[in-house]
């Protein structure tokens, strides 16, 4: 008989956060590889759009972690 150990919420958060952040960092590094002008051609506007999109995503992430109750309506 196999004994199943239930993962608690903290352990699950740590496991998923480490995996997802490490994956995301690798993907961001791959985006950085696009800066090689020997292999790619791009405009300043292209770069600004990429950076703006990534910053917006980080800002959204910060809001999600900062909000205490996302389902509560306030005026």
Image: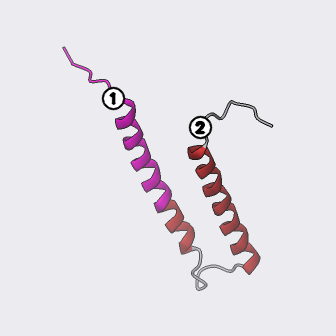
Disc 1 versus disc 2: nearer the observer: 2
Quadrant assignment, res 75: top right
Magenta stretch contains residue 10: yes
- Outermost residue, bottom direction? 38
Q: Is 52 or 44 nearer to us in this picture?
A: 52
The dot on residue 68 is 2
Q: Residue at x 70, y 30 (%)?
A: 72
Q: In the image, 44: left or right of 65?
A: right
Q: Which mark is residue 73?
A: none
Quarter occupied by the N terminus: top left
Could you tell me which residue is drawn at 42 percent across and 42 percent down? 16
Q: Earlier in the sequence, mark 1 or mark 2?
A: 1
**Label 1 to label 2, Cα distance in Å?**
24 Å
- Note whether 5 is above or below 56 in the view shown: above
Magenta range is 1-25
Q: Secondary structure at mark 2?
A: loop
For image coordinates 63% across by 79% down, the residue present is: 40
Judging by the rendered image, the residue that carries numbered circle 1 is: 7
Q: Nearer the viewer, residue 1 or 66?
A: 66
What is the residue that sits farthest to the top in this orientation?
1
What colouring style does the render use? secondary structure
Residue 35 inside the magenta-drawn segment: no
Q: Decide if residue 1 is on the left or right side of residue 20.
A: left
User: Could you tell me if residue 43 is visible in this image?
Assistant: no
Residue 71 visible within the image:
yes
Q: Determine crowd level at label 2: few under 14, some 14-19, many 20+ residues with C-alpha closer than 10 A.
A: few
Mark 1: few/some/many CA within 10 Å (<14, 14-19, 20+): few
Q: Residue at x 65, y 51 (%)?
A: 60
């Amino acid at each position: 008989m196999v004994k199943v150990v239930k993962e608690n919420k903290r352990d699950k958060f740590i496991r998923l956060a480490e995996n997802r952040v490490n994956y995301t960092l690798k993907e961001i590094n791959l985006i950085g590889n696009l800066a090689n002008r020997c292999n790619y051609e791009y405009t300043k506007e292209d770069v600004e759009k990429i950076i703006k999109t990534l910053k917006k995503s980080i800002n959204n992430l910060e809001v999600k972690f900062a909000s205490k109750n996302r389902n509560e309506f306030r005026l």
